[in-house]
Every structure is written in C-alpha cells, then in structure tokens.
Amino acid sequence: MLPAHHLPPALLRDAADRFGTPLYVYSAAELDAALERVRGAFGDARVYYAMKANPNLTLLRRLHAAGVGFECVSPGEIARAEHAGAAGEQLIVNGPAKTDAEYAAGARLGATFILDRAEEVGLLPPQSRALVRVNPALDVSTHDHLATGAAGSKFGVTLAQAPAVLEALRAGGHTALGLHVHIGSAIRDARDFTAAFGRLTDLRGQTGPLDVLDAGGGWGLGADLHGIAREARRAADAFGAQLWVEPGRYLVAQAGTLLTRVVGIKRTGRNFCLVDAGMTELLRPMLYAAQHPVTPLWEGAETGEWDLAGPACESGDLLGRNVALPAPERGHLLAIGEAGAYGAAMSSNYLTRARPAEVLWTGQDWQVIRQRETPQDIWAAEV
Ligand SMILES: Cc1ncc(COP(=O)(O)O)c(C=O)c1O
C-alpha cells in the first residue's frame, strides 16, 4: 500500500505511459502540505528553502508565491532564485568557499550572507547583512557525509570564535544580524537539535541580544518537528532574536517519487530485479546508503527478496536491497518514494545517460516541469 501522501497507482501508471521512464513525479498538494506542516510547527519563523534539495524552477516559483525565501550555495542557485523572482530579504547566500561572483551577485540582489569563516569579513561587499555560522562541535545521528556540525567538519566558526567574528563584522561596517547553525541532513533524533541550539544559547552572555537566529534545516522525515521547533524558538528567544529556518529535504522529499520500469531479472544466488533507473537518476542509496520505500505497481504473491539493480557499470548501483516483491517481469513499474529531495538534484550525465523528465500533478493534470534530456543536450557544450 502506498502511504496516503503519495499519488495513487493508476495515476503513476498513467504518468509512466505518457512520459516514459525513468520519471520523477511530484505532487503539488504534498509540497503545499509539507510547507503547512513546517509553518504549523515553526509559526512565524521566516522560511528559506534550501534549494539544493530540488532546484526545479516550477517548484521554486510555487514556494516563492507562498512567501518562502531561498538559501543559495552557488552562482547557479543564486541565478535560479533571481529567475524565480526572489530578491533582498528573500535571499540567503551561503557556502564554505564563496567566489567573487557569489559575493557580487548576492550584493546586487541585496541578499543576506552566511559567514563561514572569520576571513570572510574582509571579503564581503561593503555594508552587507550577515549571519555567522557556528559549528557546535557535535556528533549527530546521521551518515558521516551528512554531518556538518561535527568538530572536524569544514563548516562554520568555532563556538569560541563566534563572538569575536560578530564584533569584527560590526567593526567592518556590516550589519551583524546574528548566528546560524546547521548540523547536518536527514537527522531524525530531535535531541541532536536540542544539543546544538543549547550550545549556541550558551554564547548569549558573550554576544548580547541578536536580531536573528537561523536554526538551519536538516530535519529527517519522521522527526519530531514540533519538538525541534520548540527548542529552536527557545534559543531564538534567549537572544531576543527572530527565528529563521532553512529546510530542504523536509519540504520536498515526500512530494517526489521516482518511477522506474523492470528491464528483466537475474538469479545468481542473489535475486536481481534489473530496472531502468540507477545511481545516475537517484544517487542517495549509493552515496549515503539511504533507504527509500519501494512500492511495486503490480499485483501478485510475494516471491522473496530482490536487489534493485540499475544499469550502470558499478557494483554499488543498487537502488534497494532485499526488497520484497511479487514476481517481477519486464515492463512492470516500481515507485521509489521520498525521492523529491536530493533525487533529481543529484542526478548526473555519467555514462551519457540523459536525465529523466519531471512532471508535477497539479490536482487536475500533469504539468511537465522538466523535459527529458536527449544525448544531444548532453554534448551540446562540447567542442
Ligand atoms: C546550510 C544549510 N541549510 C539547509 C540545508 C538543508 O538541509 P536539509 O535538506 O537536510 O533540510 C543544508 C543542507 O545541506 C545546508 O547546508
């Protein structure tokens, strides 16, 4: 059975027949519902969508129309945000290694910068608004690659450095709005957030009151959002600050599903169900050992456990392991859930594989929000 927030199987089959596979399908209603859940938990906090999770312009425009700002970490993301209509207070420019182009674009648009190290004070455009990213030096419960607030990670300034960096910002003629913290991604244990916000709050005696506390994102699906929000609000209140948040995954993950067709099977002692999507379409299982819910869109008695193997020449190209399936046959469809975040966004042209089309169910019809690529699109920039 598909969870309620997913689109019904008949609709998914219709999309696969009309647009081909592999295919990313999104539900506009689920995107709206996720935003409502965030607003329900975080009240009047300002929401900046971390567009790295899914930068599709149609989704950006929908969020922009709903009053959401954007967190951008590359020149391309800043350009997308501008193209989607955002400017000024609706924009955050972040990143551990910003280039001159990013400072210039951020300044032109009036964005708020997140300072990742003290040296940036001298690199910021004159009279910038900035937050200081603090690394709370915490081990959190997520994949190592996804932990950004551990002592050895490349992000942010140390707790000890933070008050002096705020002071240096002011002395440099900038507006030091406050502090920022983001401890990682796909974190389900609310206690990790409590610990991080607690360490920031401990700085209150040295920083005095602040205008803004940006509590970042990183909320895993199924995390206690109200608990995280309560602790974030408590930390913001300790500084007398307005609360900002930067969810990526939480806003878009459940709105997206990857549809893939069975190409064949192979039994070698393990059962392989070969499918037409793999690491080039959805990298997360390979990169983070991420587990996505898999739903077969055909009926039948279960026939044991199958590894879902993609088409790439890499042994790790598996979208799922030990998935219980009815007997798979060439042409059957599988729905890979919770794929709206870091799915299409991390897809690649490795093996000159054309990236999938993306379609949005608006409630009435499918809207193509990204055309399927062709091989010619892939080599168009080559000389
Ligand atoms: C600074 C910052 N904010 C927000 C996010 C969004 O994280 P998530 O998609 O886990 O909510 C990220 C993700 O890497 C990030 O680095």
Image (cartoon, helix red, strand yellow):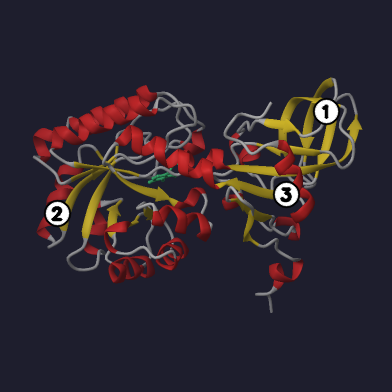
Q: In the rendered structure, which amino acid carries the disc numbered 3?
A: Ala
Q: Secondary structure at mark 1?
A: loop
Q: Disc 1 beta carbon < 8 A from ligand 1? A: no
In the image, taking residue 92 as reference, residue 291 lies left or right, namely right
Q: Residue furthest bottom?
A: 383
Q: Residues within 10 Å of mark 2 (few under 14, many from 20)?
A: some
Relative to 63, does residue 208 appear above or below in the rendering? Answer: above
Relative to 17, does residue 5 appear above or below in the rendering? Answer: above
In the rendered structure, find residue 15 and report the number of the disc placed on it. Answer: 3
Instruction: Find the distance from the CA under tag 3 to the CA under tag 1.
Output: 19 Å
**Looking at the image, is mark 1 or mark 2 earlier in the sequence?**
2
Q: In the rendered structure, which amino acid carries the disc numbered 1?
A: Glu
Residue 249, image x, y percentages: 48, 41
Relative to 54, does residue 218 appear above or below in the rendering? Answer: above
Instruction: Find the distance from the CA under tag 3 to the CA under tag 2.
Output: 55 Å
**Looking at the image, is mark 3 or mark 1 earlier in the sequence?**
3
In the image, taking residue 246 as reference, residue 129 lies left or right, namely left
Task: Evaluate whether residue 203 shows in this view.
Answer: no
Q: Is there a contact, CB below 8 Å, between mark 1 and mark 2?
A: no
Residue 172, image x, y percentages: 13, 61
Instruction: Find the distance from the CA under tag 1 to the CA under tag 2.
Output: 64 Å
Q: Is 69 or 27 nearer to us in this picture? A: 27
Q: Residues within 10 Å of mark 1 (few under 14, many from 20)?
A: few
Q: Where the C terminus falls, by quadrant?
A: bottom right
Q: Residue furthest front?
A: 364
Q: Residues within 10 Å of mark 3 (few under 14, many from 20)?
A: many
Q: Is 298 or 150 nearer to us in this picture? A: 298
Q: Which residue is mark 2?
A: 168
Q: Which residue is mark 1?
A: 299
Which residue shows up at 10% across the image and 58% down it?
171
Q: In the rendered structure, which amino acid carries the disc numbered 2?
A: Ala
Residue 285, image x, y percentages: 64, 37
